[in-house]
Structures are given as structure tokens and as C-alpha cells.
Image (tube, grey):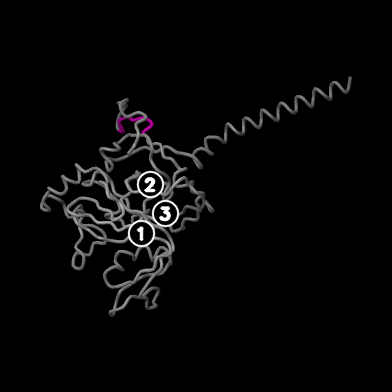
Amino acid sequence: MKNKESGAAKKYSGFMKKVFFIAVIILLAPYFIRIFICDQFVVPSDSMQPTLVTGDRILVNKLIAGPRIYKKFDFAKDIPLRSFRIPGIRPVRVNDVVVFNAPRGYDRDNIEFRINYVYAKRCIGTPSDSVTIRNGYFHNNRYAGPIGVQELQRQLSETPDSLLDSNILRAFPFDDARLGWTIRNMGPFYVPRAGVRIELDSMNYLLYRQVIEYETGLGLKYGGGRLLLGGEAVGEYTFCKNYYFFCGDNVFNSKDCRYLGFVPEEFIIGVVRRITYSRDYFGDNCRPGRWWKRVE
């Protein structure tokens, strides 16, 4: 009799362990998918219009560039990002629509990480590319085809400067005397790649100051006819990380790298592949025509 009871107890215990194991998998599966495979974000603005519109729910594939894994979970202000990336299917490419953490997370004049401050923009430049905006059109020395939405770039090309507010027209690094770049004409400029050494001078340090200060934690200043990094004279610099240049398709109304500068590779979350569904951001009007639409 005791053997029967003992056998029944073992079967029951084994059954409960299986139930518990299955329950744990069910509970953890959504987190596993969000961390390692894909995640969904809501588009809050029209900066990527017409590709993405306000209220689109976008599916972000993390397998392409590789899932980003945090080493530390302290995301307070002034705390640097500590993470590593699992190898992905391929690197981010020009014309990919990418979700990433904004390079100026707290809207200060330096690169800093902010956990839930994310943008969706189109990749214009990858590490080692030379990027130019010429008469409103995007150009990349290693990409022969059109980049972004040509119709809106044509409209920018044909719009006189006098009709654009200076806050919209003026572009990074905002030195009118030496560069005078605008969103209509800027560059060419090199997108930093890890391991590449560049010579620094009184002109290009304006472009790479944020990058160098982000990597070294030291201030880069120009004075007395020379460049000083942390108070020491410097004439060249070797980049430690890869960077990207992203812009919105709505070139008239997009807070992007034309104003903010380069985005570190570790800030990339994933590549947008589809719109899962779409609903008016300020109401309940659904847009079935956009559901499961591929993003290109």
C-alpha cells in the first residue's frame, strides 16, 4: 500500500514540476523575445513620414544587428552605458530604418545614454562612409543608389533659405563662420570607424569633439593655435568605437544627426522590418491599409 502511495506521490511531484517548468517558460517567453529577437515601438511623430506616420506600431528586429545586452542596469543620469552585443545576421546598412537611443539623451551638448529616449530614423552613413548633403539630397561615397525619400529632398532643394527658419536650416556643428553648414548643404564628412586614426585640426575637431569626449571622458578644446585634450596637446586621434549617421525621411521636420551629430553603435536597438498595425495617435481611428506593411 505504501509503495502505491509513494509511486502516486512521485508521479504527482513530477507532474507539478512539469507544470511549473511550462509556466516559467510561458512567463519568461515575452521577455526573452523582447530582449533577444524583436520588440515593438509606437511612432510618436511625423519625422519619418511618409515611411512611418504618427501612431504606427513598428516591429524592430534585433537579430539583424545583434541583441544588445546590458552589463549594468543603472540607467540614471550621467551613468554611461555598459553593454555588449551578441553577433547579428549582418551590419546595419545604408537605407535601413533603425531604432536607436538618441545620441544626446538629456539634450545637452554631449553624447549620453538615456534608456527610454529612442528615435526611429533612416541610416545615411555607416562606419568609414563619407556623407554629403548636396542641394538637399543625401549622398554616400560607398552607396550608389538613392537614399531616403527623394520627393521630400527635392522639395527641400527647391525651397529658398528665406522660407526656412534658422533653427531648421542651420546644421551640426553650428559654426557659421568656419563651416556654415545647413540641412541643404553639409559635408563631406567621415563617419568614424573603430581603429581609424585621423589628424585633428581647427576645423574637423568641431565634428569629432563629441565623439572624442564620449570615448575618453576628457574635454577637447581649441585655443592658442593648438588642440588640447584633457589639457594635453593632441594632433591626431584613433577612434575606439563605430558610429552611424541617421536622418528622418521628413527632411523638413526631423530632429536627427544633422543637428545632433554621430550615434554610437552601442546605442542601436534594432532594424525596423514591419508596421504591425496603425492607429491614430490622438484617437481611435485604425488604418488597416498599413497593417503588417513592410518598411523599406
Kind of residue indicated by mark 3: Glu
Q: Which residues are magenta?
A: 275-281
Read off the residue under disc 3: 265
Residue where numbered disc 1 is placed? 128
Q: Is residue 82 left or right of residue 169?
A: right
Q: Callout 1: 10 Å neighbours few (<14), some, many (20+)?
A: some
Q: Is residue 35 above or below residue 246?
A: above
Residue at 28% x, 61% y is 189
Comparing marks 3 and 1, which lies closer to the viewer?
1
Callout 2: helix, strand or loop? strand
> Mark 1: which amino acid?
Ser
Q: Between marks 3 and 1, how big is the CA–CA gap?
A: 13 Å
Q: Which tag, 2 or 1, sits closer to the chain's start?
A: 2
110 versus 44 height, above or below: below
Q: Residue furthest front?
A: 144
Q: Secondary structure at mark 1?
A: loop
Residue 131 sits in quarter? bottom left
Residue 39 spot, x, y in % from top left: 45, 38
Mark 2 and mark 1: Cα distance apart in space: 24 Å
Percent x, y of residue 216: 43, 67
Label annotation for residue 208: none
- The residue that label 2 is drawn on is 118
Please state the horizontal and vertical placement of residue 243, each as a whole percent of the image.
38, 57
Query: Is 276 within the magenta?
Result: yes
Q: Nearer the viewer, mark 2 or mark 1?
A: 1
User: What residue do we see at 62% from left, 30% from top?
Assistant: 23
Chain-order first, disc 2 or disc 3: 2
